[in-house]
Image: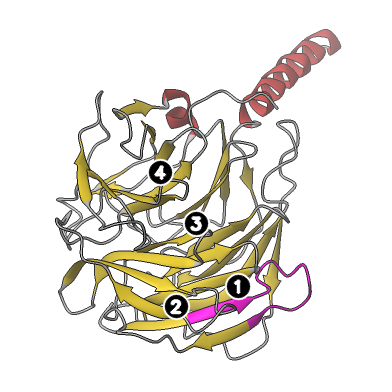
Amino acid sequence: MNNSKQMALFLMVGLVLTATIARAQTQVWSQDGPPPRYQHTAIYDPITNVMVAFGGNTDAGTLLNDVWNLVGAFPANSKTFLTETWTQVSASGAPPTARFGHTAVYDPASNRMMVFGGSLNTASTSCTNDFWILDGANSAMGTPTWIQMSASGTLPGARTGHKAVYDTTTNSMILFGGADCAGHYYSDLWVLSNANGQTGTPQWSKLAPSVSPGARQECGMVYDTANNIVIIYGGDKGNIATPYSDVWTVSHANGSGGTPVWTLLNPAGKAPTARTQLTATLDTANNRMTVFGGIKGTHIAGDTWILINANGSLSSSWLQLSNATAMAPLRYSHSAVYNNSVNQMIVFGGLDSFAPPQDDHVFDLSSANGIKTKR
């Protein structure tokens, strides 16, 4: 090949690579993270821009109780990517037993991550209802410390596959559903007051809404703090071939202001296919819930959906993000966190097939609420 042809080929390849990078700036994979895992948890600290991942199951069937920080989790602008840095955290204190299918929530004011329940073996025949706090979770002030807490009140039954959210206004953790590792599925709703352990002894209370969305595990669940409303979507009752596709809200979800009431929404527009083991995040300012991934039978999803007017205060409707679908990985049993200030969602871990997890990638979706964000 002569020099002119070589140069032409080089320029053509360069243009292709440049275009590829430009397209990838909104959805970028980072490398060299912690061991691949699924059914773990991840929380996000917006103050230090750190995501904290805990526990999960591995490709070898080994349960984990390790803690990892993703520093610089969300890039400063759309032209900055692959800047995230994973750091393993060596927390002091006796750690929780290795587990998966647990929940974790975070209080930015106290810098404490709260962990509840989960499965203690790969066969999911042993569940727990213990409660742990990781003090100093973002590692910004030194070594984090594990603290096991003994909550008062009647405890929820041991479970896995449940969901939990945190109410910053009342320092409460709200818990819903799950399975007891013995074939029973829950539809109960609980509130743990004094959840961060700093303002008093945590105390469990069971709420009694007038209706129920039905027992389920592995649904998506988010919380509208301003209106005290929990929103759930999907999940299953022990059979991934027949998951749910319904959307429910519960009012007075933290147990204050009135009697909690479950309401079934009927969003307009084309709806997502039924699914379980998905993730959901909420942009509270715009009242939009973002649903990503999940599984139904042998179909693993990589699509992204927005529920507009998610809290049901106005008529809700579904919107599919078609551009995100084209670039997204297939994924279920993953984690997702959202940064409302930059309108980005991070997805980490999970499974992309029925084989073990293949990588430790982080997926970063810009304009995650479906509204184009200029950065």
Q: Secondary structure at mark 2?
A: strand
* Residue sitting at the far right: 3
Q: CA distance from mark 2 to mark 1?
A: 13 Å
Residue 330 is tagged as 4
Q: CA distance from mark 3 to mark 4?
A: 11 Å
Task: From the top left corner, tell me how far across and down residue 5 is, in percent.
Answer: 78, 10
- Location of mark 3 (residue): 349
- Give me the disc on residue 63: 2
Circle 2 Cα neighbour tier, 10 Å, few/some/many (<14 / 14–19 / ≥20): many
Give the mark, 2 or 4, whose residue is nearer the N terminus.
2
Is 348 left or right of 46, judged from the image as shown? left
- Residue at image coords 67%, 45%: 74
Question: What residue is disc 1 on?
Answer: 67
Q: Nearer the viewer, mark 1 or mark 3?
A: 1
Q: Are marks 2 and 3 in contact (CB under 8 Å)?
A: no
Left/right placement of residue 16 relative to residue 237 reads: right
Q: Residue at x 41, y 55 (%)?
A: 351
- The span shown in magenta is 132-145
Q: Could you tell me how far apart the alpha carbons at marks 2 and 4 are, in whole angstroms?
A: 23 Å
Location of residue 339 in the rendering, given as x and y in whole percent from the top left corner = 60, 44
Amino acid marked by disc 3: Gly
Mark 2–mark 3 Cα distance, whole angstroms, equals 14 Å
**Label 1's element?**
strand
Which amino acid, by three-letter code, is at mark 2? Leu
Q: Front-most of 223 and 279?
A: 223
